Image (cartoon, rainbow, N blue to C red):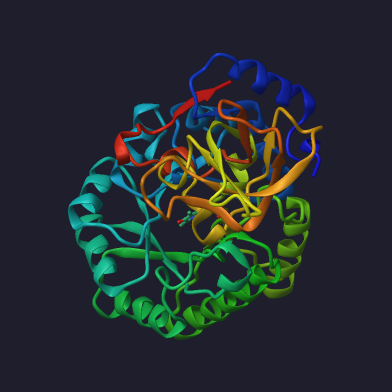
Amino acid sequence: MKIERFISTPDWEKVKEFSVGKETPFLVVNVDTIKKNYQELKEHFEHADIYYAVKANPRVEVLEALRDKGSSFDAASIYELDRLFSIGVEPSRISYGNTIKKSAHIRYAYEKGIRLFATDSESDLRNISEHAPGSRVFIRMLVEGALSADWPLARKFGCNLDEIRHLISLVREEKLDVQIYGLSFHVGSQQRNIMMWDYALLKAKDIFDWALEEEGIQLEMINMGGGFPSNYVVEADPIGTYAAAIEESLDSHFYEKRPRIILEPGRSMVGNAGVLVSEVVLVSKKSHFEHYRWVYLDVGKFNGLIETLDECIKYPVFTDKEEEEKEEVIMAGPTCDSMDIMYEDHKVSLPLSLREGDKVYWLTTGAYTSSYCAVEFNGFPPMKTYCI
Ligand SMILES: *Cc1c(COP(=O)(O)O)cnc(C)c1O
């Protein structure tokens, strides 16, 4: 595995230089890489509007860079809304994409000017009608993509087609004060099966037709969520391949009557912009006869690497001793919790000469790392983020 697959040589040199003398663990985020990702996505999906999923990396510098590129944003909570407002993002560029929200938070968002909400249930729809009257609402479809996504988002969100029809009818029957604007789905994060978008779009088309025929409502928008890949150990297709397949699906299901398309990338926007720099705390063996070394680091599941849960996300790992002989190890974090093991089945090969104090670099860690840190589990503070 060559490092050039994950980061350009100048960027890599920059990270290493920047890391000298700094206390680990920390995340280095290259904001230029995020700008490039935005540009690339925009070029591949010319007609789509991009709503960056803030939760993937909510750093102000990241949000500012995307704001300046013209991005819109998808917020999961009023706290993310506040952060967006604090850097001057207009409410018209923000969607409230979480289907699970308190009435008080719907009201707060509405008072601040938010008029675009996700929903997937009758209760939430009624709450939006009451507390955010006149808003546009998109209904999240339940889609099955769990088996081919590295980090599935199945089951918890979305509702079945029968429930979607029910919600659309309900708005008319009870004169709820919302506009059913369209549908959304999320095929699962780091989705490797490109056909998942096709299945979802086919279902969406079904609802579009039904709504027009039965309810006289022309739905206008499809929010295709995230799910686009970042660059981990198991290689994924480039974004261009995804875009080409999705374009074809849109053509074949909607012909020339295409809805407005919204994308909500998180991982693919920021993942490859981050390098997490950590340090070896201890190298040991459980027995003299044991084959595997245990490498304990100052970063683990609770301060940045939660997505190694079930070894779902396999980050590329490098050291400063890449030329030396390597053997497979078990990698674990620093806390007194036995689930704080990153990789045991997935074997990472690390240099035999690896010692306490040596640096270990986790690449493609720009998404879902810093925002997931515990604040003081075992007393360890959340890791720092530096933007370069
Ligand atoms: C998390 C999330 C996203 C981002 O998904 P990625 O797979 O990281 O791109 C987009 N939309 C919604 C509603 C989400 O919950």
Question: Could you tell me if residue 266 is visible in this image?
Answer: no
- Relative to 136, is 210 on the left or the right? right
* Residue closest to the far front: 288
| In this view, 201 is above or below 264 | below
- Relative to 345, is 134 on the left or the right? left
At x 79% / y 34%, what residue is drawn?
324
Q: Quadrant of residue 89?
A: top left
In this view, the residue in front, 294 or 93, is 294
- Relative to 37, is 221 on the left or the right? left
At x 27% / y 81%, what residue is drawn?
173
Question: Could you tell me if residue 363 is visible in this image?
Answer: yes
- Relative to 378, is 373 on the left or the right? right
At x 68% / y 74%, what residue is drawn?
253
At x 55% / y 42%, what residue is drawn?
284
In this view, the residue in front, 138 or 335, is 335
Looking at the figure, which quarter contains the N terminus? top right
Q: Quadrant of residue 351?
A: top right
Q: Position of residue 353 (x, y in %)?
A: 70, 33
| In this view, 39 is above or below 147 | above
Looking at the figure, which quarter contains the C terminus? top right
In this view, the residue in front, 69 or 284, is 284
Q: Position of residue 42 (x, y in %)?
A: 68, 43
Q: Position of residue 338 (x, y in %)?
A: 41, 54
Tally of numbered discs: 0
Q: Position of residue 187 (x, y in %)?
A: 57, 66
In this view, the residue in front, 146 or 374, is 374
Q: Quadrant of residue 59?
A: top left
